[in-house]
Amino acid sequence: MNLENGAVSGSAPFTIDLAEKMGIFKIIIYATSTTESIANWKVTIKDTSSTKDAAQYNEVGDTYTGCTVDGDEASTISPAGQLDSYTFSCTPGKFAATHVKIEWMGDGSATAVTLAEVVIVGKTWESYPCPLGYHSANGYHSGCTLCSDGSHDSRASYTHNGLNTGCTQCVISPKAIFYTSTDEQKAANQCAVCPVAQIIQSGNLGTCVQCQAGKEYNAVPNSSTPGGCDYPATIDRTTATAIAVTTPADCDTVNCADCPAGTYRPSTGADNEFCRHCPDGSVPGSAKDGCDQCAAGQYQNTARTECEACDAGTISTAGATGCAQCTEPAHYTTDRINCNECAAGSVPTSVGDDCEQCVAGTKRAAGEDACTDCASGYRSDAGQAECVACGAGTREENNECVDCLAGTYSLGSTDTCTPCGSGHVQPLSGQSECNPCEAGSRKTSDTECGECPAGEVQPDVGRDVCVACAAGSIPNDNRTECEECPAGHKEVSNECVQCEAGTYQDTPGATTCVTCPTGQFTNQPGATECNRCESGEEPNSDKTDCVPCVAGYYQDGSDGSDGTCQSCDAGSFSETSGSDTCTPCSPGQYQDTAGQDSCSPCQAGHISATGATVCTQCDEGTKTQDGIQCESCGIGRKSNDDRTDCVECEAGTYKEVEGAGDCLPCSDGHYTSGPAASKCLPCEPGTYQDSAGQSACELCRLGSFQDQTGQGSCSPCIENYYTDQTGQRVCKRCPKDTYAAGGSSACDDCPTGTREEVELAMNGQPDALKEKCLMDIGGICASTVITNQYGTFTVPRMDEGSHITIPCEYDDNNPEKYANFTCKSRPDMEMYVLEVYHCFNTQNTDNIKQLADDENISDQEKADQLEELTSNTARNGLGDVEAVSNVLDSMLEDEDEELTEDVTVSILNSVSNLVSSDLKVSEGDATSASNVSDSVVTQVVKVAQNTEVKNTMIKSPKVAVIDVKKDAGAPPTSGGTLTFSLPTDSDSNQDLTGCQVGGEPEKENTILLIETKDSDENKDMDMTVVLITDSTLMPDTAISIVPQDDTTDDKDAVGNILKDLESELEVKDGEDSDKVEKKYVNSFITEVKIDSPPEDFKLNLFMKPKIDIGNTNTSLSTKEDGKRVQVVYLCAKYDPSTAKWVKDCQTVYDQAKPSDGVLCLCSHNTSFAVLMSAYEIDRGYAQVQSYLTYVLLGASTLGLLLTLVFLLPAKALRSTRSAKINICFTIALLLASLMFLIQDAFISADDTGIIKLKSTACAVYAMIQHYLWLVVFVWMVVEGFLMYLSLVQVFGSHISKYMLKFNLAAWGIPLPIPFIGYFVFTKTHTVGSFTFTDHGYLADTMCFLKPESIPFYALFLAPIVLVIIINIVFFVLVAKVIKNSKSSGNISDQEQVLRQLKAAVGVMVLLGTGWFFGIFMSVPAPQFQVAMQYLFILLNSTQGVFVFLFYIVLNDQVKTHWLVKVGLQEEKRTTTSSSAAAAGKTAATKATAVSSSANQVDNIYENAAVADDHTYASAEYATAGDKAGKHEFPAKSDNNANI
């Protein structure tokens, strides 16, 4: 194709559509110049025809491809460096195309080129020859078919006119190695050659295969020109040999030949290998594809072709290559397989295939090698296995046996006879033995024996002589032996006679008898032994019988007894004769003498065990009444003098352990007020005891004090301090303008006058007294001496505002440890010294530290000393707390060593002493003090975990612990709850020694309940709980200590709290915040430690307040300026890192009865407490605002009632559209106002009203109020909408059944909102048996929505804001109309402005835009907030007044109606033409309007744009057209009703 104008890269791509499907040879592109680059042009083709034959390579479809079979992208793009032209050669015969696409592939950096011409070389598909390897009937693409396997294309190359109409077959004989199978092989003009060792079989001409089993690859080279056919002439067939032929095609013959004789080739594992020899002992099978092993009795011949039989007399095993003779002696073979032994008496022949007999005189036994001669004394016949021995009494001679002569014998198997020996004779011949002379005889010759002489015996046979009997023996009748006299006999004169009674002989052959031993007897003659008497008896004196033991004696018949009666040991007795045992004395009895028939009882106060010889007196501190055991007297009890009973320790004495020991007298400064004391109590501050063993402490006398516990004396008050009552723990400072000498019980008045006059009058008095009087005049603080745990501080006289720093006495002059004293004045000008301590150590700190390092005392001793060192609670400081922590750490070093319960009690008493102390922590030291104190709390937890007792509460006055293990014994937990109780009659200081854990205590006694949960399911868990009564160890400067002592009740404590708040209230009076920062811990501090809590862990606590503050809804204090304070509860956790109690967990409690308890719903474990915090709930102006609200709301309610009174009776007035809306709005506002006004008659803030706060009735009342105000808000929107339609839009709006729709909207839309608020935000929480309701919807002191809550903001404030926004839009639009309104008469501009202003204010009030100011009442700016509150009250509390004003008083239509009704004004009517008449309507509209006069008020709501057409005609005189319209809204007639 010639491109006339050229084709540049900008016009690419372009396609060339071919007239028909063509076979493509090549495509050539030409540049416009021979020097131009032709690079970066891409040429692709596609075939969109409907058919594709087998020889076509590219697919039919709409996809462009290259025209080479390799598919390389580069083959479709002209390369760089090519000039003038480039040819894209296609794979011959393979590609067809109907379209060719030319496109430029260069990027922006390449120079654009121009194509001049594109040449496509090809032929139509039907005239396009088949590609190489394919053929067809005519050689063209009209059904090209691939050559079959074993054939190839006859063409040497592809040309445009070269045709293949048939393929050439490969020749496989005599060389079966030529084949074709792939397209490439079939495209070649020759056949491929099989690899070495493979051939072509006639059934498969396309696949080369190995020779079959039993055959091998065979090639015959050309003898003259072998070429590459280097088939080996000799093949090593002893092993697997690989076939190696360089060029099989050079061979004359290539085929598979049978394996040579003696070789084989298996079917597997022998590819490319020659046939090889079978293994030794095997020969090839008939198919030569395997080897058969030679059987036993055969062997492999040397040619390895067959197995041959072994020669006679030889054998072989299976797989043998040769045979061998039997190797075992005397064996032969007949089957050439097995060797058999010849029968006994025979041996193998020389050939070895049979056996022959041994000759006479020889023998061969089984297993022997050959025949052997018989031994001497033996003979045999021929063929014998053994030689036969000559019998006894014979001898062998010449292979025969002959008898022995008399006097000789033979045992057989011998060739000689033996003469008879000593003591033996043989009178006969042919005997096997000589006979021994019988017992009782002797040998007299070799052939006979003679009897023993008298008195002699021969016990043995075969003896030559006899022997005489020994003494004590006699010969028996046969003279064979001497017989001893039997036991029980003795030999007397060569005769045996019996022993007499009382004697015995247990040995035969005795010549005497023996008397029975001690404790034995015999009552018969001839006894061989003596007998023991029965138990309880002993022999008589001549030992011929037994007699019973007397009382006090026994004979038990045991093996260890000598058979005589023994006396009972001391401590036992026998009370009857014939006893076989002694009875031990019973417990409580004794016997100190042996051989007694009874025991004596122990004396009083003594005890004995079983078998006692003496009684032991009970130890001091024990008693006995039964004489059996001593019982320990309990703690606080001792034994009486005779140890028969326990008596209580007398007052003034104590005993702190059970058991032994007397009661000890209390030391100085201690006492016990009653009997049975376990320990002495330290004298409380304000008391002393200077004698030991006292039952009470003495009150400090007048003028003295004692601020420490356990003291033996009181200290006199220092100067200017006094005590006017006995038993004071501190001295009171003399009031202003008084002074006192040291030790005074009263103060004297200071002289009056100026400073100089006072100083002159007190001349001669101590400086301290003088300074006090001068101090009270003002400007100075008197010198004083202050003593506490940190030392004695002498504070000099100071001017107001000055301060002095004094080093702490026990901190080794550490410059960072000091006390700061500042002279300050109170609001009443009274001077005082502010004390701030930055001290650490006390007098006892070093002593406590030494305990931690002392390894020579036990834990119990260490704990007892620690308790003693911390007992003076007025002298414990921060350094002591740290030292105690170190001591506990030293006791807990060995984690495997558990603490005893007594040790733990002493530890808890020590920590309790710390809790009772005033550590005097300053604000700057709070964090460091917290770290020190927290270490003690942590150690207490570890102490609980290391105590040996589990699931048992261990207690002290201020601290109690329990380590709960659910798998150890019976845990006190139940269903995931752990309950702690304390009797309600416990002391006000809440002594924890009376605390109980577990069980089901009465609710009023429950002080703490811990509930553990995994997700929402209760679950028992291992936990450690520590209870602490006070927050001493959790220092927080924001926490105040409730001013109380042991005699302070809850009511006084609450009074003290409010008094403590007064100063802060005064300070914060001018500040922006109404929150009082002081807080009080009003519960036990609970440390809960749960190791490895679950992921969704929840911890709920019920905690009972320690101080009952009563109903928190009640105003607890009202000051003269009207300020009121309310106390609330907060659940809090202690954060040691910041030394702060932090509000934590969800707090739920009944504000009417907070003493019932507080629920803390948490999700972690730590130190918890309930904080009591005071808030100022009303400012001084709150009461004024309340009165103002009631007055204005009362007036508003009256106005609403009057509005209804004037509208409802007048049908003409109430039937207008706007009047109906106004009446509905008025009714809703009236109901809401009445509900608000009358609530004080039923509801009281102190919950003393008929309707109780938080009750169901209260909830109903609140929801009704909420609902009515929401209804009012909706009616406000309706009012605004009405004004908009009437004054702004006027025309074009029509609402059918508008009153029904407005009422449904106003009364229906708000209906579900109160229900949603109450039921969604009222939740019930249960912990154990305690259930509390969290009223998130109801307010605390009234039956309305809770201020500053989600329901308040979402369900009350949000609707207000929405109404305000809507009505502000309406107000702006209406105000604009009012501004543009015109008067119907001639009035001045000033009057017009006043009327417009009056209308704007009226509209604003009616639309409720006054609620807008309520949004800003929460702005935290006091003055602005107060202004907004007053503005809100004035606008909204008078809404009813404005309704009456604008609906009644300023409404001309209403005034005229009632003036006409009462006859004070004459009815006037005027006919006016309507706009309809002016427009040419035929029907004239007649209306009566109220005429204007100078003293009448024009209608200010008139729209100036339509003033002529819209008068305020009364519905009473409405036109017929208006009546026909049935009061549709807005009116379709030209008359517009008065709004």
Image (cartoon, rainbow, N blue to C red):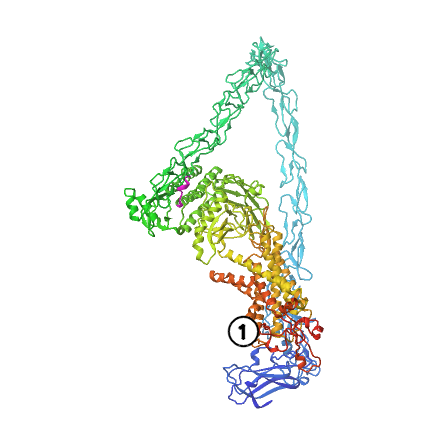
The image shows residue 1148, relative to residue 606, as above or below, that is: below
Q: Is residue 189 magenta?
A: no
Magenta span covers which residues? 871-878
Query: For mark 1, what is the residue?
Result: 1391
Q: Nearer the viewer, residue 372 or 528?
A: 528
Rate crowding at label 1 as few (under 14), some (14 to 19) or many (20 or more) other CA atoms within 10 Å: few
The location of residue 662, given as percent across then percent down, is 45, 28
Q: How many marks?
A: 1
- Figure quadrant of the N terminus: bottom right
* 535 horizontally vs 643: left or right: right
The image shows residue 343, relative to residue 1241, as above or below, that is: above
Q: Which amino acid does the dot numbered 1 rest on?
A: Glu
The location of residue 1007, given as percent across then percent down, is 54, 44
Residue lying farthest to the bottom in this orientation: 4
* 647 horizontally vs 548: left or right: left
Q: Is residue 875 magenta?
A: yes
The image shows residue 1505, relative to residue 311, as above or below, that is: below
The location of residue 1092, given as percent across then percent down, is 53, 50
The location of residue 1392, given as percent across then percent down, is 54, 74
- Figure quadrant of the C terminus: bottom right
Secondary structure state at the residue bearing disc 1: helix
Say if residue 269 shows up in the picture: no
Query: Toward which corner of the image does residue 267 lie, by quadrant?
Result: bottom right
